[in-house]
Amino acid sequence: MTDDAPASRPHAPLGYLLDVVERLKRTEPEVWAWASSLEAQAEHSKAVQASLLRETYRLTPVAHASVYDACAVVLERLGLSAPVTLYQAGSGDMNAALVHLPGEAHLVFYGPVLERLGEAELAALLGHELAHYKLWSESGGEVLVASRILEHTLADPGAAPSHVQTARLFRLYVELYADRGAAIAVEAAEPAITTLVKVQTGLQSVDPAAYLAQAVELEGADPAVSQGQSHPETYLRARAVDKWWRGDADFEPWLRRQLHGPLSMASLDLADQEALQALTRGFIARFLGDEAMRSEAVLAQVRGYFPDWREVEPPLAPDALAPERIDDSVRDYLGFVLLDLALADPDLRDHALARAAAAAAAFGAGDSFLAALKRDAGAPKREVDALARKLKAAA
């Protein structure tokens, strides 16, 4: 870890957040216009203000001067200029939260957080929460509008799984952005990490280096993708802020692996849906690289997948089906695509099945392809066994 000046650490929204913003603006223009309207903002602000007054105790600058002074320093380091009002909630675990109103930052403290955190850690906590305000306020509040749309979508019982997954990942990236604000507020990663652990555990003393070593150990023993719904797991957040602050060259691909993992049918967000379509098109194009496979019957099957199929489509890159890029569910899906194409033209059956079986084996789905051929297509055992022998001989 280093204590380099934060000037070398640009605090811009993470790419995933900007991608979702542009996607929603492009695909849901009417919804975007509503969520951006002054009327919607005014209704939200009125409800929020009433809730704050009803459920919290407002801290005054006179009685709590030290916290307000810390806020002023953090605002300057984050490049913000906004009135801040602080509140103490009546109950809850040790934490803090930003309540955003246009042009105003309202911070609510929960539990004994003001008593448990040291000076640097309190600044880190304030940096995290005020970074939320920065994110919601900049670029015309577009990230806030996207968040509002996604949260309203989740309230609909008919919300598509891809919207649920997009909203989940959006929240995780928002928190990682805010964690960067914590590091900028104290000009170091260590207090940001100790604050994360203290808030999670309630401990009064935390060794950030020891916790990072623990996080690395856990990552090596259990390289699972984050299952967080509103926040990434604390060990991932600690690793992420440390890697970002140090300018780790591997940071972006590392973060992608931690939050997304390989392409999976069970966790497709809006971007992954497009990625799967592109993958399928390229996969089919590569399979049709054999001129003999381009019969009218096969092409009709292809157009069943993609009505806009072109005569010339770019084939899939060889590494696109690597184990770290797709999981078993996608491999099985592509196996069924191969099966559809191989059985589309009875006149090509033998050649097509041999080619499809070899293609499936190349990306680790040979056995499941043969099982599907027998189970779902009703192929006779002798035909399946003959293909299995060919695959074994070619291995």
Image: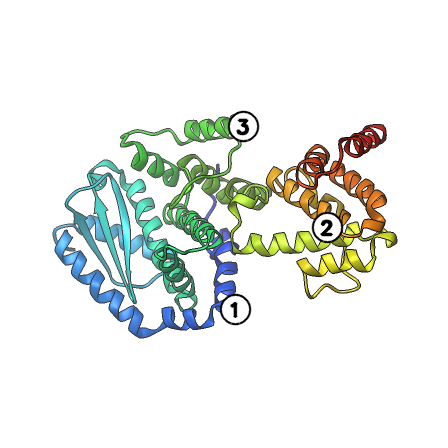
Q: For the point 33% across and 54% down, which residue is it?
A: 130
* Local secondary structure at mark 1: helix
What's under tag 2, amino acid-wise? Phe
What is the distance, in whole Å, between disc 3 and disc 2 at their CAs?
32 Å
Mark 2 neighbour density, 10 Å: few (under 14) some (14–19) many (20 or more) = many
Residue in the foreground of this view, choosing between 240 and 289: 289
Viewer-nearest of discs 1 and 2: 2
Residue in the foreground of this view, choosing between 174 and 151: 151
Can you identify the residue that label 3 sits on? 220
Apparent side of residue 157 relative to residue 63 in the rendered image (left or right): right
Q: Which mark is residue 283?
A: 2
What is the distance, in whole Å, between disc 1 and disc 2 at their CAs?
27 Å
Viewer-nearest of discs 3 and 2: 2
Asked whether disc 3 touches disc 1, contact meaning CB atoms under 8 Å apart, the reply is no
Q: Quadrant of the C terminus?
A: top right
* Local secondary structure at mark 2: helix
What's under tag 3, amino acid-wise? Gly
Among the two numbered marks 1 and 2 on one chain, the one whose residue lies closer to the N terminus: 1
Q: Which mark is residue 26?
A: 1
Where is residue 388 shown, x and y percent of the image?
A: 79, 30
Residue in the foreground of this view, choosing between 251 and 142: 142
What is the distance, in whole Å, between disc 3 and disc 1 at their CAs?
40 Å
What's under tag 1, amino acid-wise? Arg
